[in-house]
Image (cartoon, coloured by chain):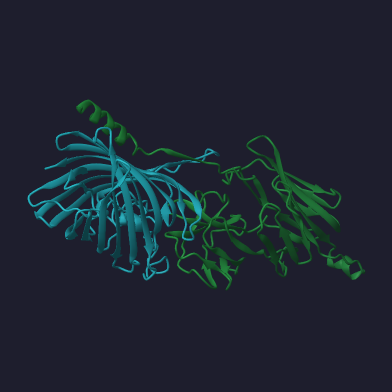
Amino acid sequence: MEIKKKNQMFYYRSEPAFTLKFKYIKKSVFLFLFFGMFIGQAQWVQKKGTGYYKAGFWWLKADTHYTNVGLIDPNATRGLFISSFFGRYGVHDRVTLIAYVPHTQVYQNTQVFSSGRTSISGEQFSSLGDINFGTEIQLRKSANWVLSTSLILGLPTGNAKGGSDESYQTGDGEFNQILRVHVGRSYRLGKKQFYAKANIGVNQRSKGFSDEFRAGAETGTKIFNQKLLVLGRVNIIESLQNGTLDATNSNGSIFANNVEVINLGGELIYKLYKNWSISLTASFPVSGRLIYRAPALSSGISLQL
Amino acid sequence: MCRICSLFLLLVLCTNCIGEDFIDDYVDPSLRITNPISSIQEGFSYQFKASFFDESGTKVVNPTLKWTATPTTTLKITQEGIITALSAGEVTVQVSTQGLQGNSISTQIDFTVIPSPMEELTGSTTETTNTISPTVDNSNPTSGTGTSTSTTTSSTTTSSTTASETTMGNGVIVIPQVYQGEIRSTSSYLLQGGFRYEHNGEHLVLQLDSNYKADTALPGLYVYLTNNPNTPQGGYEIGSVSVFEGAHQYNLPASIGIMDYKYILYWCKPFSVKVGDAVIFD
């Protein structure tokens, strides 16, 4: 990610919402979706011929989850570790192509009993996750405002039945499309320059999953001689409750439906030198349904060309 | 720079290692007389059987059992649990063993020795009563004539038996065991309904009442019979739950005895989450 001052405003290039989205996880674990991290927004597109590339890790370990009524219940500790590549490339000054390729590992802790009975061994499963492709189009741009839209296609390239009990999914097995509208602007607080962005959108899902309303906002500023970007963000997923999939018709599949979450997080992005920067992200679901309740962390290194 | 990145990468990779969850699965040890009777005719013999389940709910193979009967003038018993009815009257048979922690665990059954038909013709009558009272978990004793009830003090679930007695050819009247109770949710997920657990002459049947409801948001919900409600391990997996509302039943294998398992357990298998349980008997 990078912020640079241009024409008296910040230009903030971040990963698109789907970037680290874990739709697969969402469903997949009824639980337990942990989502998170990557629901950034990108209303500033790449200039033609330029690109932004990032290699990153995202991980989470949860022993509680939000139930379908929003209460907190325990679960066997599960972990998710995703290593990913994300790229954006400007094919036109107003059109950017986006790709996200994850490799996902899901694991569960060994269950050890106080009585001394035989432990239940832990398990892990990993494979290619659900790949996302998309495009982002700048609609309008003024001195302080930018309006854009994006369409992200979620391909079911992950494994929807991983592990011994098929609950270690690395994908949700469905094709989905996320259509969003983004708006962003720069502003000042005293002498400090800030930026703010917001987006709303709909995730249209297939195979009986409910569609989702999505929204997000973030704001940030650069400190330490403009080398460190500090930002905070909130992301929301609300189920439209129009799916047909539940335990009665999924043959015991663990795919969950109607996942909801309000996620708060922050990110630090430090510019190392020239076009290289590193980032560290943390987020936590303050409320939700059918989603893991645990902090998610991520880190990455990015290159702007 | 490369060194810092390498260290950071190593740190990140170390976060995705499989760890351990510690589960407290203690349950009160349970000693059960698995073939209780309500009465036996004077002059006849009968062999009691008992099973012992330790603090993990695991059935102990060939436990050391100590059988006693009182009054000894009415009933004689061997250390194999074989009784011989000597004379008419109320009797108590107790069996005890030692738990893993060295504590004594016992249970007892009260029943009646009825006089032989010859004496009965002379006008001697005895009311048939039976009482089974486990002493380990301090539960209330069960009592009644052909009808016994028990209420656990450690759970909101109530179990009861209601059945008519069956006379066997060896002068023994056995108690057909029928257990009823309520399934309760132990999580935030919906799970409720009454159950009936009995032997239909061929095999055990677990019947769920029409007021049964289970949450459809749960993936991979399974139902088990177990002696430890904290884990399905060591229990019998009846199968995945496919009915989420209304009456239905599970037919169990003939190899399962009605007192082999103490609990019904609903478990989200993929994520090792306990959803609810029911106490079949105390």
Residue B125, compared with residue B21, is above or below; it is: below
Question: Residue at the spot x=67%, y=61% of the render?
Answer: B159
Compare residues A137 and B277 and report the one nearer the observer: A137
- Specify the quadrant that holds the C terminus of chain A: top left
Asked whether residue B223 is in view, the answer is yes
* Chain letter for the green part: B
Looking at the colours in the rendered structure, which chain would you say is drawn in cyan? A
> Residue B148, position in %: x, y?
74, 63
- Residue drawn 28% across the image and 67% down it: A206
| Residue B276 placement (x, y as % from top left) | 55, 57
Q: Nearer the viewer, residue A26 or B52?
A: A26
Residue B42 makes an appearance in the image: no
Residue A57 in the figure: left or right of residue A140: right
The image shows residue B97 at horizontal and vertical percentages of 69, 41
Q: Is residue A99 left or right of B193 when viewed as pictured?
A: left
Quarter occupied by residue A5: top left
User: Which residue is drawn at the image coordinates 77% and 50% (left, top)?
Assistant: B93
Instruction: Give the image quarter of residue B60.
Output: top right
Can you give x and y, in whole percent of width and height, for residue B141 in the image? 76, 55
Residues B62 and B248: in front is: B248
Residue B45, located in which quarter of the rendered image? bottom right
